Image (tube, rainbow, N blue to C red):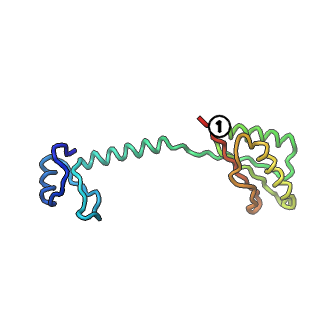
Amino acid sequence: MGDNVEMGVYPISKARDLANEQELDLVEISPNAEPPVCKIMDYKKFLYEQKKRDKAMKAKASKVVVKEIRFGPQTDDHDYEFKKRHAEKFLKDGAKLKAYVFFKGRSIVYKDQGEILLLRLAQELEDLGKVEQMPKLEGKRMTMFIAPKTSKK
């Protein structure tokens, strides 16, 4: 890209002539600089390379998966253990966990039990994940988020 042209300050007409001579484009890089900075390059090729880089970066970006587990305020031990095993599997697979207690009808009076249940879950899963959001009551749901602990390589 402009290998045989040394860098320097040229009037715009001379720069345009140099670009036409090489059958390349004169691209304004920094219009606010004094004087404005331009570069001689193949602009279509530049855009193509940019799209290729953006696509590669997007492919490398990891997508966050959120798995949900629903409890009732009076979930018994067997159901709790069953759901806890699922939570362990989700965290081991690298997914975030959204555990929530759903209060139906008048069961909202047991919100203490719901919070205790979620805190117990957080404590038992602390070796696999860390609590991202403590139990928080939103309407008829008490929600807590647990993110998987990243393994050090």
For residue 47, above or below residue 104: above
Task: Say which element carries label 1.
Answer: loop
For residue 151, above or below residue 140: above
Q: Locate residue 102, reporting x and y percent.
A: 78, 55
- Residue 112, image quadrant: bottom right
44 with respect to 130 (left or right): left
Identity, as a three-letter code, of the amino acid under mark 1? Asp
Of 142 and 103, the residue lying toward us: 142
The residue drawn where x is 12% and y is 48% is 21
Q: Which quadrant holds the C terminus?
A: top right
- Residue 125, image quadrant: top right
Of 96 and 36, the residue lying toward us: 36
Q: Locate residue 132, reporting x and y percent.
A: 68, 52
Q: Which residue is mark 1?
A: 93
The residue drawn where x is 23% and y is 48% is 41
Q: Locate residue 146, reporting x and y percent.
A: 70, 48
Of 72 and 55, the residue lying toward us: 55
84 with respect to 17 (left or right): right
